[in-house]
Image: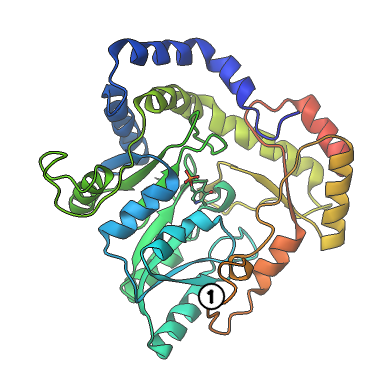
Amino acid sequence: MQFIDLKAQYTALKTKIDEKIEEVMNHGQYIMGREVGELEEALADYVGTKHVITCANGTDALQMLFMAYGIKKGDAVFCPDVTFIASIEPACVLGATPVFCDITTDTYNLSPESLERQILSVKREGKYNPKAVVAVDFLGNPADYVQIEMICRHYNLILIEDAAQGFGAECNGIKCGAFGNAATTSFFPAKPLGCYGDGGAVFTSDDEVADVCKSIRVHGKGTSKYDNRRIGMNSRLDTLQAAILLVKFEALIQYEIEERQKVAQYYNKALQGKFITPFVKDEYTSVYAQYALLAESKSQRDGVIEKLNSAGIPNMIYYPTPMHRLPVFAQMENYGEAYVNAEQYCSRTVSLPMHPYLSKQEQDYIIEIVL
Ligand SMILES: *Cc1c(COP(=O)(O)O)cnc(C)c1O
């Protein structure tokens, strides 16, 4: 059994993927070939933003945005205490100070209350300039954009949506990737929309930000690669990966999102009452990048993991350590935040196999072992 069965997906899509790969091999435009533009157009059309700028990975996508917004030393950038480090790492590379906020107890996303408390604390201290917020669609479940957008507007902060796990989900009829001033996603193989290597993208409807990101993507280019206007990066999406993504994107929107939701509902039905199952708000959908259970206690969670391991069922903890306790951030100022929800979540969560090709028989077996 696979945690995420990319082989089953390849088997289902093999003819189309192989055909697309062969087309690229024949036309030979390995860098910025036509498939890159086709993918950007298809994604923009789906998400509903004016621009999509693909790039080498989801971390670079965030870095390009942080650079485009001029994030620098002295700036405070707020993000949830439970996420992958890539949500904030590029801001740190640029010299900014990360400020971690607690999560909510329902969707485990950035807590608007904690965010506002942290913004006020940073302002009161006066050492750093509150500049931007990174909201993450945690495990494929959209953050509370109604509240978070209001707070960002009130305190004049840039809002960036990290939709690395959320591509394909939506909230109030708006697709993930369309929230905030700009958004990013990742095409790492294990993400809801993944390629066969690294890839990422920036989403925005802001013409200027889009232009700057396109420049940053190719060494700060102007009219040409040798007319450099700013310090940039080398962060393009390979044509081969774009070609593969064109096929996978079609499958995702045609049936994979729905299959993911069916798998989640099947787990929910069997496990509700015994564990806290994923909660999705009204008017929201989740793309279930992961299916995470919350146990009653750490010892119950650890017991489940032991049973899964002995039965040979792959499982993961997303994430074992809250950001504020990672060795790299342990010395950061917490502004009095105790991260009660983040600590509880990390000590009690476990993720089960989740992908659109998981069979009912496999699920029945997993459920039997978990119970
Ligand atoms: C995967 C991930 C990223 C980074 O994506 P890469 O393509 O691996 O650089 C950023 N944020 C979150 C929340 C992620 O899960």
Label 1 neighbour load within 10 Å: few <14, some 14-19, many 20+: some
- Left or right: residue 193 versus residue 262 is left
> On the rendered image, what quadrant is the C terminus found in?
top right
Residue found at the far front of this picture: 226
Task: Identify the residue shown where x is 23% and y is 46%.
Answer: 219
- Left or right: residue 236 versus residue 186 is left
Residue 81 rendering spot, x and y as whole percentages: 57, 66
Colour approach in the figure: rainbow
Residue 129 rendering spot, x and y as whole percentages: 34, 79
Task: Identify the residue shown where x is 64% and y is 32%.
Answer: 355
Q: How many marks?
A: 1
Q: Is residue 192 above or below residue 173?
A: above
Task: Identify the residue shown where x is 20% and y is 48%.
Answer: 220
Residue 24 rendering spot, x and y as whole percentages: 34, 16
Q: Nearer the viewer, residue 346 or 92?
A: 92
The answer to whether one can see residue 260 in this image is yes
Q: Is residue 253 above or below residue 336?
A: above
Amino acid found under the numbered disc labelled 1: Ser
Residue under numbered circle 1: 114
Q: Is residue 127 above or below residue 82?
A: below
Q: Is residue 91 above or below residue 119?
A: above
Residue 217 rendering spot, x and y as whole percentages: 27, 44
Local SS, label 1:
helix
